[in-house]
Amino acid sequence: MITLPDWLRIANVAEIDSPALLIFEERMEGNLRQMIERVGDADRLRPHIKTHKMPRLIRRQLDLGISRFKAATIAESEMCAAAGARDILLAFPPVGPRAERLLRLAKRFPDTSFSVTVDDREVGEALARVFHGAGWDIEFLLDIDCGQHRTGIAAGPAAFALYRDLATMPGLRPGGLHVYDGHLHDKDPVKRAKDCAAAFAPTDELRRDLLAAGIPVPRIVAGGTPTFPMHARRADVECSPGTCVLWDHGYATQLPDMGFLPAAALLTRVVSRPLPHRLCLDLGHKAVASEMPHPRVHLPQIPDAVFAGHSEEHLLVETPHAEDYPVGTVLFAIPWHICPTVALHSEAVLVRGGVTVERWKVQARDRRIEI
């Protein structure tokens, strides 16, 4: 059996049922501080909270001077506001009942500034009607498609016209531009930086055109974990990393230059040895993100692991050294994709100094909290 890395050693590991999500506090703290160092000042950050969804982690970031956050759902926004955040961007189209829920959220937390991304005229008009009809207003950020083709409008004349028109609607206030370049994650940091600059250039030009026309552009919110250090070199850009708070094996493999450390792991156990060379772990689809092909986890204790099957509660692993892992053996797994993995767990076990100390609720995994 391979020796367990020191950071994964837990004195009271026998007390933890499996599967379990673990957060290693010292590593998480190091990632948070490195995130701040990469941008130079906590005021340059607007971290995405979708990775962790935990109020305790929001409060820790507030303690470190981070005051702005980005969310993907109303529940994430609500959790963030309840944890004490005073500036929250909902980076998701406010379609359907979401506009009304956003209004209720703004009323529930009047001391928090909420904003939302918009990329469609009809959606913007509906949002304006909801807020103006209630005697409120809200900042919008025009969502720019810089190449991912997921949401947003391409920077150019149509984007200029849409931003200009939305800025005049009662109930809406111009808040700036949002540009997410999630398709840029080249392993070569030089190429990644070059691609990032090319993708961002039209947004920068749009900002200049809007300002020249006398239309306010208070901010640009840009990037994700792979590109936020590049955006940090640009003046007046708020950087939005997310995954780097906890890190995962996917980014550790794809982005070795970034230097963050895995701060989360899954605890699992061998529950059966159905064949001489096969182990069955209690780490099924319901415990780890499974939207990608194998490997979905990295098993530091079984470096030669071959993944042979995956179902709701079971993960099948084959190794010629299976006899070294008797039933009941504790194993640790580093998820390939941490964000959806966290959403599968109602709580995380916090490890400090090699001992479990408390449990953190993953509150915003729910689609609805109260609003």
Image: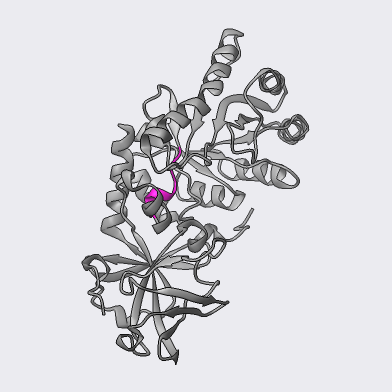
Is 242 magenta? The answer is yes
Q: State the residue at coordinates (60%, 9%).
A: 214
Does the magenta run of residues contain 75? no
- Residue sitting at x 26%, y 57%: 26
Give the tally of numbered discs: 0
On screen, residue 321 above or below 166: below
Measured as percent of width and height from the top left, residue 236 is found at 43, 23
In the image, residue 220 above or below residue 297: above
Residue nearer the viewer, 242 or 130? 242
Regarding residue 219, the answer to whether it shows in the image is no
Looking at the rendered image, the quarter that the N terminus falls into is bottom left
- Whether residue 12 is visible, yes or no, is yes
Q: In this view, does 65 lie to the left or right of 79?
A: left
Residue 176 as seen in the image, left or right of residue 16: right
Q: Quadrant for residue 6, please give it.
A: bottom left
- Which secondary structure is most common in the magenta stretch? loop
Q: Which quarter of the figure has residue 42? A: top left
Residue 63: % across, % down: 33, 45
- In the figure, residue 249 lies in which quadrant? bottom left
Question: Residue 140 location in percent, x, y?
Answer: 62, 30
Residue bounds of the magenta highlight: 240-247
Q: Which of 1 and 91 is in front in this view?
A: 1
Q: Which residue is depicted at the point 40% across and 86% down?
A: 277
Is 164 above or below relative to 114? above
The location of residue 273, given as percent across then percent down, is: 43, 90
User: At x 44% / y 41%, what residue is drawn?
Assistant: 186
